[in-house]
Amino acid sequence: MSANMAYLRKVKPKPIERWEVEMELLSSMNDFEMVGEEEPVNNVVALFRERGHEFSVFTVDWVREAVVLVRVKEGAGLYSKLSLFQAQLELAEEILSIPISELQRVADSVTEEIEHMQEIFLYMTGRCGMTLLLNAVNVT
């Protein structure tokens, strides 16, 4: 698959022990078992406008120069686990890889639909206080 091409790919979680041991390492697509082949996405803007709400950002693959998003099992809540990372790892069904060079076009395509939203992304490097933070955010 071309490094400049967006694609979808089915995945399944690896055994839990694997990521519990390596939680301190950077996340990567190697955190999942790949299922089947990569499905090229010819129009990533159209796909994101239609299905972007199904995915959450998982990691940046600096080698492939792509952002990797994860779609979890239908009906599974991302906040059902202690952390978003844990939920993504345990509940993942599909990844969407978008070349970094395409991100601005994707963002521009949904600007009007999300202009009323104010997103605040908090990144915590440790686990201390994460559960409390998630519970507080879910209440508001």
Image (spheres, rainbow, N blue to C red):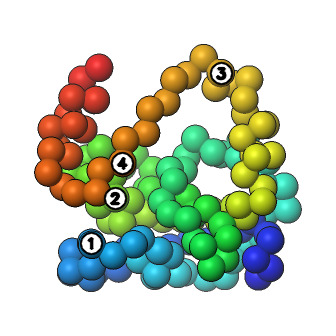
The front one of 129 and 50 is: 129
89 versus 57 height, above or below: below
* Quarter of the image where one finds residue 15: bottom left
- Marks 3 and 1, Cα distance to the nearest angstrom? 34 Å
Q: Residue 85 carries which label?
A: 2
* Residue type pointed to by label 2: Phe
Q: Name the residue under label 1.
A: 23
| Residue 105 image position (x, y, % from top left) | 80, 46
Labels 2 and 3 touching (C-beta < 8 A): no
* Residue type pointed to by label 1: Met
- Is residue 116 left or right of 59 when viewed as pictured? right
* Residue type pointed to by label 3: Glu
- Marks 1 and 4, Cα distance to the nearest angstrom? 15 Å
Labels 1 and 2 touching (C-beta < 8 A): yes
1 or 2: tag closer to the N-terminus: 1
- Marks 2 and 3, Cα distance to the nearest angstrom? 27 Å
4 or 2: tag closer to the N-terminus: 2
* Quarter of the image where one finds residue 139: top left
- Is residue 44 left or right of 88 when viewed as pictured? right
Q: Name the image quarter holding the C terminus.
A: top left
| Residue 6 image position (x, y, % from top left) | 74, 65
Q: Mark 3 points at which residue?
A: 115
Question: Mark 1, mark 4: which one is toward the viewer?
Answer: 4
Residue drawn at (50%, 50%) of the image: 56
Q: Name the residue under label 4.
A: 123
Label 4 residue SS: loop
| Residue 68 image position (x, y, % from top left) | 57, 63
3 or 1: tag closer to the N-terminus: 1
Question: Mark 1, mark 2: which one is toward the viewer?
Answer: 1
- Marks 3 and 4, Cα distance to the nearest angstrom? 22 Å
Label 3 residue SS: loop
| Residue 11 image position (x, y, % from top left) | 50, 73
